[in-house]
Amino acid sequence: MSAAEENPNPVVHERTFRVEPEMIDVNRHLNNVWPVQWIQDIAIEHSDSAGGTALMHELGGAWMVRVQHVEYKNQAFLGEEILGKTWVASYGRLSCVRKCKFERISDGKTIFESETEWVLVDVNRGRPMPIPDAMKALYGAATAP
């Protein structure tokens, strides 16, 4: 991402996830497919609750992942509750970086963290579109005077 502008006061969204039987792999821990799903789920939920999804539709846009990095730090096991937190950390002209952190509630250990670059795309043209200040403001960014 080029010329990123840090979000000085990000709005943090939280959600609790539970490790269910279908999420367990042959190694008897949370399969790596689920963290990617949770990252998407919490991002969408944050966007919905902040009003970003409605504005995205008004603009004729859609968010698409350009780059995603997930760092696994500890394992999660059946029945554990995991607290997910997400926020928009920075903005470029056409994209933003959303960070997530997922911690086991019982001991506070970080299970995984992620950093995802999302691009706002004009759905009619199939091309990136600038992120308006109104969108940035929904996630805690100060708008330009």
Image (cartoon, grey):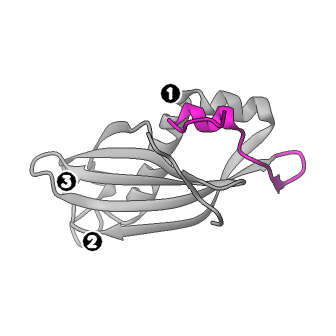
Q: Residues within 10 Å of mark 2 (few under 14, many from 20)?
A: few
In this view, the residue farthest toward the front is: 145
Of the residues tagged 3 and 1, which is closer to the observer?
Answer: 1
- Residue occupied by mark 1: 49
- Earlier in the chain: of badge 3 and badge 1, it is 1
Depth order, front residue of 97/21 = 97
Of marks 2 and 1, which one's residue comes earlier in the chain?
2
Determine if the magenta segment contains residue 128. Answer: yes
Residue under label 3, please give it: 78
Coordinates of residue 66 in the picture (x, y in percent) = 64, 64
The residue at 59%/27% (across/down) is: 51
The chief SS type of the magenta part is loop
Alpha carbons under labels 2 and 1: distance apart:
36 Å
Which quadrant of the rendered structure holds the N terminus? bottom right
- How far apart in space, not on screen, are marks 3 and 1 (Cα)? 29 Å
Q: Is residue 14 left or right of residue 41?
A: left
Check disc 1: other Cα within 10 Å, few if <14, some if 14-19, many if 20+: few
Q: Secondary structure at mark 2?
A: loop
Magenta-span inclusion, residue 143: yes
From the image, state whether disc 2 or disc 1 is nearer to you. 1
Q: CA distance from mark 2 to mark 3?
A: 12 Å
Please, what is the three-letter code of the amino acid marked with disc 1?
Answer: Ser
The kind of secondary structure element at disc 3 is loop
Local secondary structure at mark 1: helix
Q: Residue shown at 21%/66% (left/top)?
A: 74
Task: Identify the residue at image location x=63%, y=33%.
Answer: 53
- For the C terminus, the image quarter is top right
Residue placed under numbered mark 2 in the picture: 26
Percent x, y of residue 7:
50, 47
Q: Residue 65's spot in the image, x, y percent?
A: 62, 59
Q: Which residues are magenta?
A: 123-145
Q: Could you tell which of marks 2 and 3 lies nearer the N-terminus?
A: 2
